[in-house]
Amino acid sequence: MNDTTPSTTSGFRDRFDREPAGLWFGPGRVNLIGEHTDYNDGFVFPFAINRRAVVALALRDDRMLRVASSFTEEIVEISLDDLSPETVSGWSAYPLGVAWALGQKGADLSAVIGFDIFIDSDVPIGAGLSSSAAIECATAVALDEVWNLGFDKQVLVRVGQLAENEVVGAPTGILDQSASLLGETDSAVFLDCRSFESEVIPLGFDDAGLELLVIDTKVSHAHATGGYASRRASCETGARLMGVSSLRDLTVDGLPRAATTLDDETFRRVRHILTENQRVLDTVRVLREEGPGAIGALLDASHASMRDDFEISVPELDLAVDTARAAGALGARMTGGGFGGSAIALTPHALIPAVQHAVSEAFAAAGFTAPDMFVVRAAAGAARLS
Ligand code: ADP
Ligand code: MG
């Protein structure tokens, strides 16, 4: 991944005609299990990956902010005095939104000076690996340092979320930023989205000879807003009809009552959330007690629940999951919000080529766009690079 580093420095030089003061990175993430549970105050279990955004940054001597990225020729400029959710839009809303959100969380933006920032990333956009949180978290750790803010990582999680919610306008939870900021090598972040407590749990994939293969279906999840919002609404309806403030207040023991209280569709949406919360807890327990080779069935059950109960899968994701499993993956599921994006397959190291070959063949036979496939490793969270 260090191959993005020289290009980040030279990209900064090209755009701004001077040297950066430093480089900071923020990783993308894979959610191992726990889907759509975050906004239901539930459990998630993501990890930071070895694909990341790297930002080069230098302070200026005035109040201007200038933002550039390797993915566009555009340079966006705005004064700190004009920064607000209404004045920024498009891709620059991610880094500029973070600058604004730091102010909302207590940084005195009237007392700081502006910056030039250049963004470089190898996190694929819209693949369900959170290229957005990667940028937010890289920017957040960079500004926290150069502006001498001393915020802890829990606060920076909320800064990234605030930027995404208020400036970008995406109603997302804290999953992505928590993984990107709190991740550790070979470990995943077990996160309680109600208490915000988190625990870093070793995955042990290496010792078990396992890899996590990402299968990016190339089906864009960008126009999934309607589906995401309607699933949120179903969960809220389910909680209200069950007489609880959030679905976190129910466990799988509440399923019989839910079955008699709710209409069939709402019941299935609720069943996904309650069983998915249980699967996250089970995954953490099985990892500790038996090791990663034993979590495959939980990944499979998670996919079935998203496909049949929550109905957020697409044929490409189902084919990726079924084919990977048939070719030797121990377990596989779609990851991310659904309606496209990526699947993950927990696969013995020696079987990676066979699984990739089988998935390629199956996609070609079905007439689907060729997927992009790559192994990811659980990596350290956002920090200064050099
Ligand atoms: P994802 O699932 O990848 O997070 P999002 O739609 O949440 O998908 O975020 C993708 C958006 O993030 C892009 O449309 C773009 O605005 C921004 N983005 C991602 N990567 C870059 C980059 N390298 N440079 C600038 N903006 C980027
Ligand atoms: Mg995103």
Image (cartoon, rainbow, N blue to C red):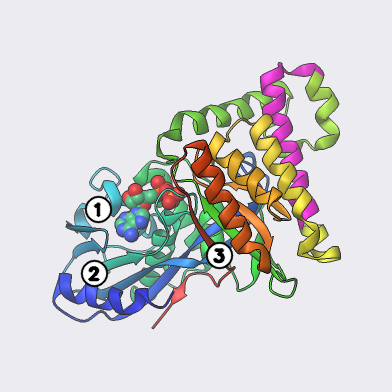
User: How far, Cα to Cα, is label 1 from label 2?
Assistant: 13 Å
What label sits on residue 115 in the rendered view?
Answer: 2
Tell me where residue 53 appears, x and y as whole percent. Answer: 39, 65
Q: Mark 3 points at which residue?
A: 376
State whether residue 149 is above or below residue 327. below
SS for tag 1? Answer: loop
Tell me the magenta residue range: 260-283
Q: In which quarter of the image is residue 201?
A: bottom right
Sequence-wise first label, 3 or 1: 1
Sequence-wise first label, 1 or 2: 1
Q: Mark 1 points at which residue?
A: 83
Quadrant position of the N terminus in the picture? bottom left
Tell me where residue 174 appears, x and y as whole percent. Answer: 54, 51
Comparing 228 with 93, the one in front is: 228
Q: Badge 3 local density, few (<14 within 10 Å), some, or many (20+)?
A: some
Tell me where residue 304 appears, x and y as whole percent. Answer: 70, 37
Q: Does the magenta stretch include residue 261?
A: yes
The three-letter code of the residue at mark 2 reads Phe
Residue 43 as seen in the image, left or right of residue 70:
right
Sequence-wise first label, 2 or 3: 2
Q: In which quarter of the image is residue 270?
A: top right
Comparing 176 with 374, the one in front is: 374
